[in-house]
Each structure stands twice: as structure tokens, then as C-alpha cells.
Image: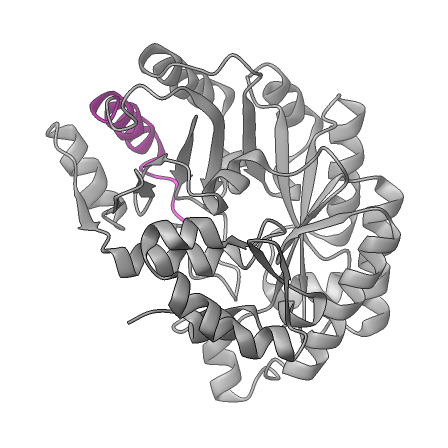
């Protein structure tokens, strides 16, 4: 089984914290859709006939696509790619300000059956600080409208650790998710990425820097309250009620093949990784000429091991020593893990090594200590 990811590189406006590839101009949207259709046809053999079990529209803001755009894209997908016998999970990322009744009804006419909604916060102050395009009212009503239209498989994004997000507001954000019965939650710490508006604002002193202790307390509160509400913390940033894990993202963490379509999109076939040019005009030009524009690297055994450790430790499935032995690094891993088993940040269950709740605070650092060179 394999996954298909489509990067839709358009947004209404730039969020202050975002460093993903996108454009705030929609002038080339039609040309972009045509290029995506062309790439889908040219890349039809990349997955070597493995049937798709998930399709994911990310970005950017895929909810800016119209129904006609989506119909064209789905038509090309189903023309060239086999589909698994089990029902497809088809996710579309959406911004609350796009999800009016008309848009939701349009989406119901497509194969999309899961919405990942960029709520980020139910607080007006937080949304203004992040420069989100929606307001607090839209954050609430878009979910209610989607549920009333029959979208039950919903995910909400929330950001914690913002200098504008008090502990009281963070508690209120989580309480709203629980009250709305949203089955999946993706929750991310506000991160200051280089060359973003947020990084510039902090450097200029017009915004307070992110406080690590403030963020850590909110992450701890997140784990405590979601567990009490019945959510399973199956990946560092992802929590779900039973039966509502993101199948698409789970396939990434479990090392399954996936094909990325669109500018800046990444693909992985188990042995190599490739990424498309991160420039809308260059991407369109190359596809108009019938050519693919990407860079590729063949993964060395060390890179495959390091990637497995990095992704595996983030998940409830952890790292399996049998897999690590296949890669040839079992002695290195078990020796490095001793210190984390001793300090309680890691636990072992047979051949499986997992982070404890305390270890989740330090996931990246622990993985780095276990990397091979």
C-alpha cells in the first residue's frame, strides 16, 4: 500500500510563523492545476503499481481549489493509479475562512472524506498574532458546519507555546475541541523558523520570544487532558480517539512508499528520496515542457537507520530492535539507549523501545544522541 500527497502552493496571506512553500498570488492557479495533472501522468510508475490507500491534499491552502479543480485532479489520479480494496482515506487541509456552506457542500460532491482544519486557536488575540486569515467565530462555526454536512472524520490543528496563549486560553482551546467532539488533534509548539515574519518580529523586538518553559507546561497539559478525554497520543504532535489515527501520516512514520506531486513535494520509495523544485513558475515551465524537475538522493544505510530512529521514536510504535538489526545498528542503538532507559525517558517492551511521556519533551535530542555517523 502507498500514499499520494499533493502540494497546493497557494495561500490568501502569509502566517507569521510559516516557512512552507506557497504563494499569496492565485494568478497561476489554473496553470498549476494543469501542471499537477501532467505530473500525475508522468509519475504514474513511481509507486510500481502499489495501490493507493491514502490521498492527502496539503499546502499551502488546498481549500482554495474549486470543485472543478478537484474533479480534474481526482479524474487523473483514478485514471493512472490503482486503489486499495479498503476505503480510501482522502484528506484535504482547509482554512476555516474557506469552509462556508457552499464550499463544504462542494467538497461533499468529491471523494474527500476527511478534513484537516487549520484552527490554530479559538482566541482572537492568538489568531491576530499569527496573522491567520480567519477569526475566532469562523474557527468555531466551520467545524459545526462541516459536521452538520456529514463530515465526521475531522482533524483540528492547534498551536501552543505562543506568547499570546496563556495557560487559561490553552485550556479553553482544548476544552472547545472536546466539546465539539473532534476525533483527531494535531498540536504543534510555536516554532521560530528562520526567514519568517515571526523571526523578524522577535529580532526587532516587536514580538516576545517563545518561552521554552511556557511551551513545555502547555505540552504537559495537552498530554494530561487529552488522555483524560480518551485520546491516544500516537505521535508526538498527533492525538486521536480510537479508530481515528491519520492513516496517511501513519504511513510516513512507518516507512511506507509515497509519491509527492506539486512544487516542493517530497517522494520516498524505501531506498531513495526526491523533492520537486520549490518554485511555482519553474515547476509549471518544466511540466509544460513534459519534464520533471526534482533532486534525488539514494539513502545510505546510516541515513536509513537515522531516519527510522527519528520517526520511530516519535510514535507509539517506537523503534523495533529487529528492524534496527536488519539495518546493522543494533549494538550501537542498544548501547546508546542505556542512558535513556536509566533516566526514565525511554522504556523497553521486548524488542520495542519507546519514549515515555517524560521523554517526549526531548524526542529530537534523544534521537540525535542515538544517530549513527
Residue 328 coordinates in the image, percent (x, y): 32, 57
Colour scheme: one colour
- Residue drawn at the location 43% of the way across and 71% of the way down: 370
> Relative to residue 20, is residue 328 drawn left or right?
left
> Relative to residue 42, is residue 357 drawn left or right?
right
- Looking at this view, is 274 or 126 the one in front? 274
Tally of numbered discs: 0
Residue 368 coordinates in the image, percent (x, y): 43, 72
For the record, the magenta segment spans 24-44
Query: Residue 261, relative to residue 237: is it above or below?
Result: above
> Relative to residue 16, is residue 26 drawn left or right?
left
- Residue drawn at the location 84% of the way across and 59% of the way down: 225
- Looking at this view, is 128 or 183 the one in front? 183
Residue 202 coordinates in the image, percent (x, y): 52, 83
218 drawn magenta: no
- Looking at this view, is 220 or 316 the one in front? 316
Query: Residue 344, relative to residue 189: is it above or below?
Result: below
> Relative to residue 213, is residue 173 drawn left or right?
right
Where the N terminus falls, by quadrant?
top left
Residue 192 visible somewhere in the drawing? no
34 drawn magenta: yes
- Looking at this view, is 282 or 348 the one in front? 348
- Residue drawn at the location 19% of the way across and 48% of the way down: 296
Where the C terminus falls, by quadrant?
bottom left
Q: Quadrant of residue 318?
A: bottom right
Q: What is the magenta segment's predominant secondary structure?
A: helix
Residue 155 visible somewhere in the drawing? yes
Q: Quadrant of residue 263?
A: top left
Residue 154 coordinates in the image, percent (x, y): 70, 35
Amino acid at each position: 500500500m502507498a500514499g499520494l500527497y499533493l502540494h497546493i502552493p497557494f495561500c490568501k496571506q502569509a502566517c507569521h510563523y510559516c516557512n512552507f512553500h506557497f504563494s499569496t498570488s492565485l494568478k497561476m492557479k489554473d496553470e498549476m492545476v494543469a501542471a499537477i495533472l501532467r505530473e500525475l501522468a508522468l509519475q504514474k510508475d513511481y509507486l510500481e503499481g502499489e495501490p493507493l490507500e491514502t490521498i492527502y491534499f496539503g499546502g499551502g491552502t488546498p481549500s482554495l481549489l474549486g470543485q472543478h479543480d478537484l474533479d480534474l485532479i481526482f479524474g487523473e489520479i483514478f485514471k493512472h493509479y490503482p486503489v486499495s480494496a479498503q476505503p480510501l482515506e482522502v484528506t484535504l487541509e482547509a482554512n476555516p475562512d474557506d469552509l462556508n456552506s457552499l464550499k463544504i457542500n462542494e467538497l461533499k460532491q468529491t471523494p474527500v472524506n476527511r478534513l484537516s482544519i487549520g484552527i490554530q486557536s479559538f482566541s482572537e488575540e492568538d489568531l491576530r498574532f499569527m496573522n491567520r486569515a480567519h477569526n475566532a467565530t469562523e474557527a468555531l462555526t466551520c467545524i459545526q458546519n462541516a459536521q452538520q454536512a456529514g463530515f465526521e472524520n475531522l482533524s483540528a490543528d492547534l498551536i501552543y507555546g505562543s506568547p499570546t496563549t496563556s495557560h487559561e486560553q490553552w485550556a479553553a482551546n482544548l476544552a472547545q475541541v472536546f466539546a465539539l467532539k473532534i476525533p483527531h488533534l494535531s498540536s504543534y509548539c510555536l516554532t521560530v523558523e528562520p526567514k519568517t515574519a515571526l523571526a523578524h518580529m522577535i529580532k526587532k523586538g516587536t514580538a516576545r520570544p517563545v518561552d521554552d518553559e511556557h511551551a513545555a507546561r502547555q505540552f504537559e497539559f495537552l498530554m494530561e487532558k487529552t488522555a483524560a478525554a480518551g485520546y491516544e497520543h500516537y505521535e508526538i504532535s498527533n492525538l486521536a480517539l480510537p479508530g481515528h489515527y491519520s492513516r496517511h501520516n501513519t504511513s510516513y512514520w512507518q516507512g511506507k512508499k509515497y509519491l509527492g506531486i506539486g512544487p516542493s513535494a517530497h517522494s520516498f520509495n524505501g531506498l531513495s528520496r526526491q523533492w520537486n523544485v520549490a518554485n511555482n513558475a519553474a515547476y509549471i515551465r518544466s511540466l509544460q515542457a513534459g519534464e520533471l524537475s526534482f533532486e534525488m538522493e539514494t539513502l545510505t544505510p546510516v541515513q536509513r537507520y537515522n531516519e527510522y530512529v527519528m520517526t520511530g521514536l516519535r510514535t507509539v510504535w517506537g523503534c523495533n530492535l529487529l528492524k534496527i538489526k536488519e539495518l546493522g545498528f543494533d549494538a550501537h542503538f542498544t548501547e546508546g539507549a542505556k542512558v535513556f532507559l536509566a533516566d526514565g525517558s525511554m522504556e523497553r517492551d521486548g524488542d520495542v523501545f519507546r519514549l515515555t511521556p517524560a521523554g517526549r519533551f526531548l524526542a529530537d535530542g534523544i534521537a540525535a544522541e542515538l544517530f549513527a555517523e
